[in-house]
Image: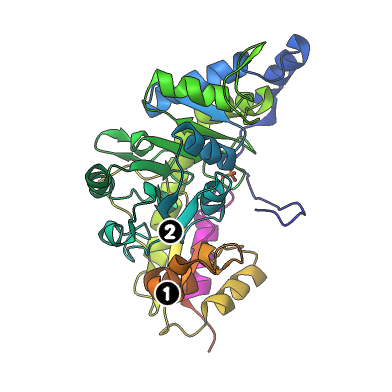
């Protein structure tokens, strides 16, 4: 999410560097640096075991994962998607020559509203690309029902959803294909990285071709692939990180509880709720700053920044506000009223390893007690 300059991401929850050093030494002495080396294989296997999904393909980042996932299903024409996401969701469509058709969100979940999808379907529609926003699971049953009715593919952008489970296991298993991201800002990180969760071995084979220039062997190219491979360093980091992941989630869960308690009954502040019946990853702590609150959303953002708490306005502006998209008919503001409203009010509070209980209390107090 950089603008050409480096972004500072607070990650005091990275594993101890000493624990990574033996792996770095092994990579240096083996001279196997990338192209499905031993760390790549082990990390892929570990992810498959952790997620309970047997066909995971590692990727260089989440955006390429999405570009490749769409290619792997040969998606074309128009795809119904959400304006309330990181801009890469729509970019991946455009990089495949696909026209995004934006549909409003359900204000309770911030996810694509299944009730509005059908009205956006045209003869050119081939798929639905939905995002599990903030790790909140989409209504996968409703989306699948529409897809079945209109013979559409379903792709999930699960960039926020690593570690989230519903009754049947990881939510990354849904749809025709799902991607996730391991970027430095995500709940689970390899600095840059991502994965494609494939439905079967055949699909994974195609993805493996696509992420390696289409090479099937040294002299055979079977598709116009791209370079989407994860290197050995990122894979080693991921493998180590996975051992700490449950601990990170437990910490985030605790901070989530502290923040919710601290923000209870604050006039004009609404904490978004996550479906408690499922395992959540506490990747984000989104609040809505309503008009009854004494400060505007941006004034609160600045106030917290002055006190050392760096919040993020995910997702503001909407994807449909950016020049490549805003002239599309489906991007017209009056069609996306819920997304617009939430985008204007939302603030994601910091919830990561650098926020302990004491800091969370201070953060909540700064929001609760605003000097008039
Ligand atoms: C971060 C993110 C991506 C892109 O992932 P990268 O690994 O940064 O390329 C895609 N979609 C969503 C919703 C994201 O938040």
User: Is residue 31 within the magenta segment?
Assistant: no
Q: Position of residue 94 (x, y in %)?
A: 56, 50
Where does the magenta region start and end?
349-367
Give how far apart the Cα atoms at labels 1 and 2 are. 19 Å
Up the image or down, 313 lies above or below 267; here it is above
Which residue is farthest front?
Answer: 123
Precedes in sequence: disc 1 or disc 2: 2
Tell me which residue sits at (35%, 69%) in the image: 264
Check residue 366 for magenta coloring. Answer: yes
Q: Is residue 185 visible?
A: yes
Question: Is 29 displayed left or right of 53 in the figure?
Answer: right
User: Whole-percent x and y of residue 93?
Assistant: 52, 48
Tell me: residue 21, above or below residue 276: above
In the rendered image, is residue 181 in sight? Answer: no
The residue at which mark 1 appears reads as 341
Q: Tell me the element at label 1.
A: helix
How many numbered tags mark residues here? Answer: 2
Crowd around label 2: few <14 · some 14–19 · many ≥20 (10 Å) = many
Q: The residue tagged with tag 2: helix, strand or loop? A: strand
Q: Residue at x 26, y 47 (%)?
A: 150
Q: Is residue 39 left or right of residue 318?
A: right
Q: Position of residue 296 (x, y in %)?
A: 52, 81
Q: Nearer the viewer, residue 51 or 253?
A: 51
Q: Name the residue at 25% across, 34% down.
A: 168
Location of mark 2 (residue): 101
Q: In the rendered view, would you say 333 is above or below 57?
A: below
């Amino acid at each position: 999410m950089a603008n050409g300059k480096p972004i500072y991401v607070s990650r005091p929850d990275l594993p101890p560097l000493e624990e990574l050093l033996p792996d770095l030494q092994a990579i240096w002495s083996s001279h196997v640096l990338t192209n499905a080396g031993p760390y790549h294989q082990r990390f892929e296997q570990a992810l498959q075991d952790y997620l309970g999904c047997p066909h995971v393909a590692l990727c260089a980042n989440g955006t390429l994962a999405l570009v490749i996932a769409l290619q792997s299903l040969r998606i074309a024409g128009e795809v119904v998607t959400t304006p309330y996401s990181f801009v890469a969701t729509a970019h991946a469509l455009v990089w495949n020559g696909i026209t995004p058709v934006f549909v409003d969100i359900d204000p309770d979940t911030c996810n694509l509203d299944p009730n509005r999808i059908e009205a956006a379907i045209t003869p050119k529609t081939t798929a639905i690309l939905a995002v599990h926003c903030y790790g909140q699971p989409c209504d996968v049953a409703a989306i699948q029902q529409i897809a079945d009715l209109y013979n559409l593919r379903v792709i999930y952008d699960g960039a926020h959803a690593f570690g989230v489970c519903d009754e049947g296991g990881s939510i990354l298993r849904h749809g025709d294909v799902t991607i996730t991201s391991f970027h430095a800002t995500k709940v689970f990180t390899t600095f840059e990285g991502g994965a494609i969760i494939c439905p079967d071995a055949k699909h994974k084979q195609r993805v493996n071709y696509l992420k390696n220039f289409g090479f099937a062997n040294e002299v055979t190219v079977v598709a116009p692939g791209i370079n989407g491979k994860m290197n050995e360093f990122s894979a080693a980091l991921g493998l180590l990180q996975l051992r700490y992941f449950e601990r990170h989630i437990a910490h985030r869960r605790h901070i989530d509880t502290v923040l919710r308690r601290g923000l209870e009954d604050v006039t004009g502040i609404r904490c978004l709720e996550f479906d408690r019946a499922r395992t959540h990853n506490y990747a984000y702590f989104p609040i809505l700053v309503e008009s009854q609150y004494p400060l505007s959303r941006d004034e609160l953002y600045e106030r917290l920044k002055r006190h050392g708490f760096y919040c993020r306005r995910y997702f503001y502006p909407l994807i449909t506000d950016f020049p490549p998209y805003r002239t599309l008919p489906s991007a017209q503001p009056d069609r996306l009223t819920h997304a617009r409203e939430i985008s204007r009010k939302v603030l994601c509070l910091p919830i990561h390893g650098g926020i302990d209980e004491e800091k969370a209390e201070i953060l909540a107090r700064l929001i609760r007690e605003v000097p008039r």
